[in-house]
Image (tube, coloured by chain):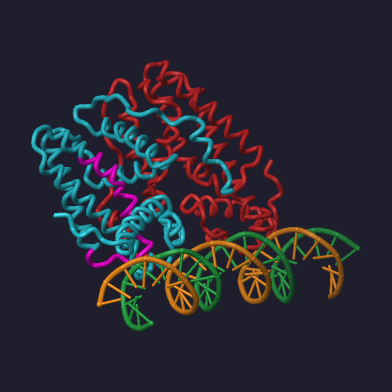
Chain colours: A red, B cyan, C orange, D green
DNA sequence: TACAGAACGGAATCGTTCGTTCCGTAGTAT
DNA sequence: ATACTACGGAACGAACGATTCCGTTCTGTA
């Protein structure tokens, strides 16, 4: 049932669709106020390829934000559907959302564009699900009860603020600090081994380099 | 031994010195790429008052960064001078640095200006002291040993990324998450009561407002 | 073998945003 | 009065970046 393999021009267009979104995600999660030309360069396409798909920079940002909320919602639903160990359901939720970089795609971009009605709705649904996941973990006694769902949201943002090296290294480090965060959230208190190597002095010092 | 109370004009100049630095700290820790006019407005002075004191924006940034490093160094030395409970010495260090917002004054500004030789030196000294504080806490068995000094640096940055409401509320929330972080660092594992009210939904939602 | 249209690449356009400089005032001290 | 220090804030000029435009390249179709 493979669709007719689209010939040359259309195939490229379809590939561009994805390349542009990927590039936009990479660029705007790194720098929410990056110029749109940075996206086109990273995607390896011209600027017009972008404007053909999104009426404006704002349109692209809205799309990214919507995707980020969708990822968030999907992760929440996945967790809520999990049976078995409540703590595992909760940690899976946290890890999925950190990996999706939802915070960087949503709240970090907020304020740089006009939220649509649709985004508002998705955001409300995401908040609702976050509360459900939180409540379930607390009621199961796995999550310390003095931490609220709003606290969790800010913890996501703190982890998302880590940006070091390439995307892979960043993910690795985020997992390291997520482990630390989870250690502080777990009831009863306990320490898990920390994954991934800690930051090296070189990694830390490199950031002092001038904009070049 | 009060110095001759400086008469009118000079008194204002002295007051401006401080007003400008305060404003610059507030503005640039909120937004490292803020325009210099934002600083003069916040300080309630004209732009020329700024340029009279600092040759350029870069000069002002260097000054702020240097001050930030000094605060960091002072907090470290204070902690190292503490006798008694090693864990308390460590938590005091963490809290002092979070309160000084050292991260926002140093690494967050790095890359927006050319580091001077002097800054480089201060930074090296700060790193050295950080290692001493870390080592002491680990050797005393108070700090979990799989966390490195570099990890602590990134944890500072994560806490500094929290910016919500006014300065006071931000500090309050940072204390809340610092408590959480310390819970995950402490050996043996234990939970402390969380200070300050958690973020409210309003606080979280407000940030979706357009740039207006 | 032309022809119309979709998709592009990327230069040109047009505001806007800043860092910095300049100029006219006002307060001080001699 | 005169010279000097500090200022406030307008003016200037360069840079940046969103968006538009135009010429070109493919595809599919007569």
Is A176 situated left or right of A93 in this image? Answer: left
> Residue B209 in the image: x percent, y percent?
57, 42
Labels in figure, total: 0
**In the rendered structure, does residue A96 fall within the stretch colored magenta?**
no
* Residue A52 lies in quadrant: bottom right
Quarter of the image where the N terminus of chain B is located = bottom left
Against D12, residue C16 (above or below) is above
Q: Nearer the viewer, residue A151 or D13?
A: D13
Q: Nearer the viewer, residue A103 or B87?
A: B87
What's drawn in magenta, residue-wise? B93-118
* Residue C21 lies in quadrant: bottom left
Is A77 situated left or right of B134 in this image? Answer: right
Q: Nearer the viewer, residue B102 or A127?
A: B102
Does any portion of residue B58 appear in the rendered image?
no
**In the rendered structure, does residue B105 fall within the stretch colored magenta?**
yes
Is B79 situated left or right of B110 in this image? Answer: left
> Residue C26 in the image: x percent, y percent?
43, 67
* Residue B70 lies in quadrant: bottom left
> Residue A192 in the image: x percent, y percent?
28, 31
State the residue at coordinates (50%, 52%): A32
State the residue at coordinates (40%, 45%): A161
> Residue A177 in the image: x percent, y percent?
33, 39
Q: Nearer the viewer, residue B16 or A194?
A: B16
Against C15, residue B155 (above or below) is above
Is A35 situated left or right of B115 in this image? Answer: right
């Amino acid at each position: 049932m493979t669709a007719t393999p689209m010939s040359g021009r259309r195939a490229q267009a379809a590939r561009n669709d994805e390349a542009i979104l990927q590039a936009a995600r990479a660029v705007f999660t790194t720098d929410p106020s990056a110029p749109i030309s940075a996206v086109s360069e990273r995607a390896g396409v011209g600027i017009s390829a972008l404007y053909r798909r999104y009426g404006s920079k704002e349109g692209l940002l809205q799309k990214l934000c919507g995707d980020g909320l969708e990822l968030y919602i999907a992760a929440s639903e996945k967790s809520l559907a999990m049976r078995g160990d409540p703590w595992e359901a909760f940690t899976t939720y946290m890890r999925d959302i950190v990996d999706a970089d939802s915070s960087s795609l949503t709240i970090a971009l907020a304020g740089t564009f006009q939220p649509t009605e649709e985004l508002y709705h998705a955001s409300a649904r995401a908040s609702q699900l976050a509360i459900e996941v939180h409540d379930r973990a607390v009621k199961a006694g796995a999550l310390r009860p003095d931490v609220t769902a709003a606290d969790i949201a800010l913890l996501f943002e703190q982890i998302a603020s880590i940006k070091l090296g390439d995307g892979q290294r960043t993910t690795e480090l985020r997992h390291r600090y997520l482990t630390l965060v989870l250690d502080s959230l777990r009831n009863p208190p306990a320490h898990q081994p920390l994954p991934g190597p800690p930051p090296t002095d070189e990694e830390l010092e490199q950031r002092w380099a001038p904009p070049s």
